[in-house]
């Protein structure tokens, strides 16, 4: 195993507290996590602001509740590797695969994964650098669950978004033919990933796509059907739009150029409609919840105006399940 790339931050994370799971199995209680500059940054100091504890943990818990332990788990676009550690801890995965386009990220992720596994049971770890699942091709691997939380925003547009952390926002130009609805709604990379991931799924396997859905759920479901997979929603929740001054004008600009529209909601409405909804119900009732939100729906341009007037604005987040059967 290579050492992680230099210039990273080394975080020490109380994993049970961060993930909200106690006890944790198969991984160390305290994780040492190398975060290279380009990686998607975790916020262990504020788990409520973080994707992994708020969106992925409930989704993995629902998977285990429905089908029991999962042997093989992969992540496309692994970032720090904490998603894989969570899969080992929660799903009980003993074969894991991970990729990312940046080699500094995959080197650090592999180090993070191997460092923080604990226990007698061996875990077979495969990490590769390259596009989507390509680095894992030719190794005889297939998976029960494949997770992706890939970026939505094309590189040409990401230049508008003066973001320091490009790994969370850009999609290089793709050679594949992507359906128009996916391009219009910034879903291109999810579309290509699903089509490729299908070939890596076991017979009863599925892909889970975590998508900060500023677009109608029907488009997300269509990503699955157009890839020959069966759509469902594991959970449906919402997030406060942080860094609104950066993100909202960006989506508003995309709208003015014919993409979207991208939908937002006042936080009061999101709190009201999601009140008392459990993660399991949120997935089963995703379309019903979306309909209940309809009267409150505003475009990115409207959201940006409201935000500048001091309104709290949020957007929904969906975990799409795309199953082979
Ligand atoms: C939003 S981060 C997700 C990190 C982690 N999976 C998580 O959920 O916390 C997206 C990751 O996808 C990676 N990525 C972007 N395009 C990719 C591609 N074509 N193939 C593989 N990984 C890609 C980025 O480098 C980044 O690490």
Image (spheres, grey):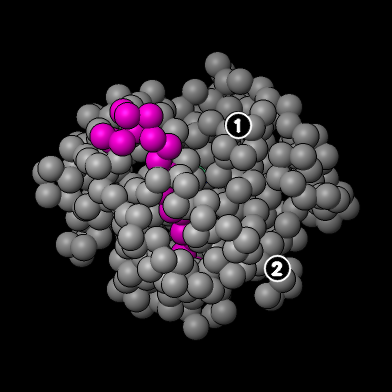
Residue placed at 13% from the left, 43% from the top?
Answer: 256
* Mark toward the start of the polypeptide (2 vs 1): 1
Q: Nearer the viewer, mark 2 or mark 1?
A: 1
Tell me the residue that label 2 is attached to.
64
In the displayed image of the protein, which residue is found farthest to the left?
Answer: 257
Residue placed at 66% from the left, 22% from the top?
Answer: 10
Instruction: Using the image, tell me which numbered label, if any, was put on residue 294.
Output: none
Q: Is residue 302 magenta?
A: no
167 with respect to 66 (left or right): left
Q: Is residue 144 above or below residue 303?
A: below
Residue 32, percent from left and from top: 73, 30
Residue 108, percent from left and from top: 59, 32
Residue placed at 57% from the left, 39% from the top?
Answer: 50
- Could you tell me how far apart the alpha carbons at marks 2 and 1 are, in whole angstroms? 25 Å
Judge by depth and name the residue closer to the eye, 221 or 284: 284
Provide the residue span drawn in magenta.
304-322
Q: Quadrant of residue 187?
A: bottom left
Residue 285, percent from left and from top: 50, 72
Query: Does any portion of residue 306 appear in the rendered image?
Result: yes
Quadrant of the drawing holding the N terminus: top right
Query: Does any portion of residue 210 appear in the rendered image?
Result: no
Secondary structure of the residue carrying numbered label 2: helix
Q: Is residue 314 magenta?
A: yes
Q: Is residue 145 above or below residue 26?
A: below
Q: Quadrant of residue 162?
A: top left
In the displayed image of the protein, which residue is found farthest to the top?
Answer: 7
Tell me the residue that label 1 is attached to.
43
């Amino acid at each position: 195993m290579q050492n992680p790339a230099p210039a990273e931050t080394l975080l020490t994370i109380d994993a049970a507290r961060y993930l909200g799971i106690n006890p944790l199995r198969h991984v160390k209680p305290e994780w040492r996590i190398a975060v290279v500059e380009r990686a998607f940054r975790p916020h262990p100091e504020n788990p409520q602001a973080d994707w992994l504890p708020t969106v992925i943990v409930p989704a993995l818990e629902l998977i285990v509740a429905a089908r029991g332990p999962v042997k093989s788990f992969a992540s496309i676009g692994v970032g720090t590797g904490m998603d894989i550690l969570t899969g080992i801890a929660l799903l009980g995965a003993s074969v894991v695969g991970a990729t990312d386009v940046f080699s500094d990220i995959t080197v650090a992720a592999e180090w993070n994964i191997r460092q923080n596994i604990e226990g007698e049971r061996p875990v077979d770890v495969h990490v590769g650098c390259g596009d989507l699942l390509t680095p894992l091709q030719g190794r005889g691997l297939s998976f029960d669950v494949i997770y992706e939380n890939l970026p939505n925003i094309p590189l040409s547009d990401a230049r508008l978004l003066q973001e320091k952390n490009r790994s969370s926002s850009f999609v290089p130009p793709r050679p594949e033919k992507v359906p128009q609805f996916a391009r219009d709604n910034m879903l291109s990379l999810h579309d290509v990933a699903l089509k490729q991931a299908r070939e890596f799924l076991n017979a009863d396997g599925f892909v889970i796509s975590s998508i900060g859905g500023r677009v109608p759920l029907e488009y997300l479901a269509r990503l699955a059907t157009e890839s020959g997979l069966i759509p469902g929603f594991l959970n449906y929740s919402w997030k406060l739009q942080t860094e609104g001054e950066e993100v909202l004008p960006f989506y508003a600009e995309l709208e003015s150029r014919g993409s979207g529209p991208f939908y937002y909601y006042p936080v009061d409405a999101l709190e009201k409609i999601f009140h008392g909804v459990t993660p399991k119900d949120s997935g089963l009732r995703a379309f019903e919840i979306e309909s209940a939100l309809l009267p409150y729906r505003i475009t990115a341009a409207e959201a940006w105006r409201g935000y500048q007037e001091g309104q709290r604005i949020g957007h929904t987040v969906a975990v799409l399940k795309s199953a082979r059967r």
